[in-house]
Image (tube, coloured by chain):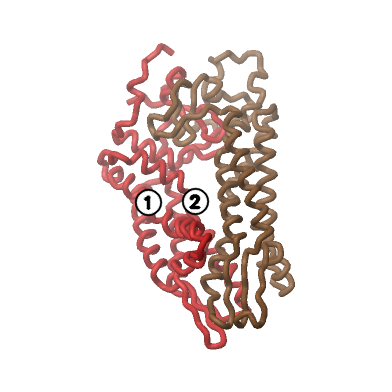
Amino acid sequence: MQIEGTYDLTSGRGLIACPRCDALHVEHDLHAGETARCVRCNAVLASPRAGAFTRIIALSFTTIVLMLAAVFFPFLRISRSGFGNETSLFDVALAFSHGPLIPLTVGLLGAIVGLPVLRACLLVYTLLPLSRGRPPRAHAVGAFRLSETLRPWSMAEIFVIGTTLALVKVGGLATISFGPAFWAFCALILVNAASNVFTSATTIWDAIEDGGAHTDGRELLRERPE
Amino acid sequence: MNDSPTNPGHDHNAEHDAPILTAHRAGLIGCRGCGRVWPAAEETCHRCGAGLVPPDRRSLNGVWAWLIAGFIFYIPANLFPMLRTSTFGGLAGNSESTIFGGVLELLHYGNWFVAAVVFTASIIVPIGKFISIAWLALVAGRPATVHDAHRRLVLYEVVEFIGRWSMIDVFVVAILSALVQLGFVASIHPGPAAVAFALSVAFTMLSAQSFDPRLIWRGLPLRSRKDQDHL
């Protein structure tokens, strides 16, 4: 363990580099509710929130339950001249399942359903032991890194906006009504946004490290005089 | 050692024009995943396991490669039809519309709002993104003033944020094709352009992600003051 506020310019101990502009900062333990920003580019370096881990876990479980509802309940219903069609999320993705469009189906299903669920599972896996003060699981480091990498590819909110656009587009053509899955999806967007507010990557990395992940190699670095 | 590292907790009002010690200048390397700082010789971050990459122009090769791939796929995305519509079993006509054709069609029906959104998401944003990333990659690491650097960073953040939203047109096509399956009355099928467009968006996202924003700050005249030591 290092002493608060001390740093070493040869080994990098006690320092943080801004991921946007590389400016060096001295690492301090922040209180819940504080936000550390880069002095040069104003990027958020850390923003711990009280009870964040428990809330992220709760929100992740909510995501999984809502996604189950969103996948299996009917999404939209269209009718015109006595012909009707009810569509669920799977139908939407399967719309591309003709011949050469199959890879796109897989990609779309992944972006809409798979990645949000996978990210929720990874976050629970990483944070559940930490929130109870236990050491992190063996693959917590890899799991959280994967979750952060996948963040931009999880596109549920874009899908919902796309749905509204599509509705405006065919609105004049036929009658359309929403199914329960549509509302589940809207709730999912809010849950996701709330989860992002509580997620501070630096704070979680610190927690994994302090929880005794075996990956911390700082002790192995040769001590040199400053 | 008069330019000691700055402090996140207490220096909110520090003057931004003052030279700032970066990890690279200090002979260290910062992890882009978790922020931990390591000696320059390290290759992976021991905390988060991410690879450590020095902020130099070599990383721009990836940016260019993905950008060119994205641009190549943007061409068929515009030439081939995005949607195939058939009404009354083809009796009332089959129509195929490209991205631009679709926008014109929407305008023709007076659907200004959707036309504007589709035009923005599928034409203005992708082209703006190609130009922005190419410009960022061209000027990366070149001398700039602090003001320039801040402008470039804003541009980078806009490109990074807006990139995924181009996917919206692909989702619209997917929803329409799943929903409008009214047998004889009307049916809509996706065209090959949908795949090309989705790939183009994904490749441009990868291009923006491979761009290292630390390069924006590399060109700053950090050594402008004579009294800086040579850390």
Q: Nearer the viewer, residue B25 or A168?
A: A168
Q: Nearer the viewer, residue B118 or A20?
A: B118
Earlier along the polypeptide chain: callout 2 or callout 1? 1
User: Disc 1: which chain?
Assistant: A
Q: Where is residue B13 in the image (x, y as percent from the top left)?
A: 58, 33
The residue at 57%/47% (across/down) is B203
Q: Is residue A55 visible?
A: no
Q: Where is residue B225 in the image (x, y as percent from the top left)?
A: 66, 17
User: Disc 2: which chain?
Assistant: A
Q: Position of residue B14 (x, y in %)?
A: 59, 30
Label 2 neighbour load within 10 Å: few <14, some 14-19, many 20+: some
Count of marks overlaid on the render = 2
Furthest-top residue in this view: A225
Which residue is tagged 2?
Answer: A153
Q: Chain A is drawn in which colour?
A: red
The answer to which image quadrant residue B193 occupies is bottom right
The amino acid sitting under disc 2 is Trp
The answer to which image quadrant residue B22 occupies is top right
Left or right for A1, reference B90: left
Which residue is tagged 1?
Answer: A56
Q: In this view, does B176 lie above or below B222?
A: below
Q: Is residue A80 above or below residue B121?
A: below
The residue at 33%/31% (across/down) is A215
Furthest-bottom residue in this view: A82
Label 1 neighbour load within 10 Å: few <14, some 14-19, many 20+: many
